[in-house]
Image: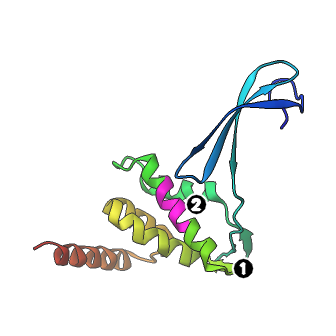
Amino acid sequence: MKCPYCAETEDKVIDSRVSQGGEVTRRRRECAGCQRRFTTYERVEEALPLVVKRDGRREPFDHSKFVGGIKKACEKRPVSLAAIETLAESVERELSELGAKEVASTEIGERAMVRLRAIDEVAYVRFASVYRSFRDVQEFMSELASLLERRGEEKP
């Protein structure tokens, strides 16, 4: 591991801890050159499928782009960053378990929306308006009516 301070490649591990539900190993290291300490994180590299966009383009799944979209929908809403990360991780885990080489961006969006609806309905509608590309107010109102119907069914 290259030291972020002096670029020395020799170091020793001072401490290792498993975190985030056993998915990540955190290591404290000490540089052999400058003796400064730094932290590294190890995680298993999961082979996520390529994302097939609406226009047919294919690109690698981008965790930060996916989380960014969810954060945008949750802006100024009482949704914690931990809840957003948990949502993203569960969708990514599902995609990984699919074993498919490619997955449509709309399918990823649908999986996110199912989870987002349970967390915050306003964020869900914001996210849905982008992912489903509502063409007019009528489509938007139809989705709201559907949400209100489901909400009424859940209450006694």
Within the image, what quadrant is residue 125 found in? bottom left
Question: Is residue 87 on the magenta stretch?
Answer: yes
Q: Judging from the image, what secondary structure is the residue with disc 1 in?
A: loop
- Residue 133 in the image: state x and y as whole percent: 49, 74
Q: CA distance from mark 1 to mark 2?
A: 18 Å
Amino acid at the residue labelled 1: Lys
Within the image, what quadrant is residue 61 found in? bottom right
Q: Judging from the image, what secondary structure is the residue with disc 2 in?
A: helix
Query: How many numbered discs, if any?
Result: 2
Quarter of the image that includes the N terminus = top right
Q: Are marks 1 and 2 in contact (CB under 8 Å)?
A: no
Is residue 38 shown left or right of residue 135? Answer: right
Q: Label 2 belongs to which residue? A: 66
- The structure residue drawn at horizontal position 76% and vertical position 20%, both measured from the top left corner, is 36
Which sits earlier in the primary sequence, circle 1 or circle 2? 2
- Residue 126 in the image: state x and y as whole percent: 41, 63
Please tell me whether residue 142 is drawn above or below residue 65 in the rendered image. Answer: below
Q: Label 1 belongs to which residue? A: 101
Please tell me whether residue 40 is drawn above or below residue 38 in the rendered image. Answer: below
Quarter of the image that includes the C terminus = bottom left
Q: Which residues are magenta?
A: 85-91
- Residue 50 in the image: state x and y as whole percent: 71, 73
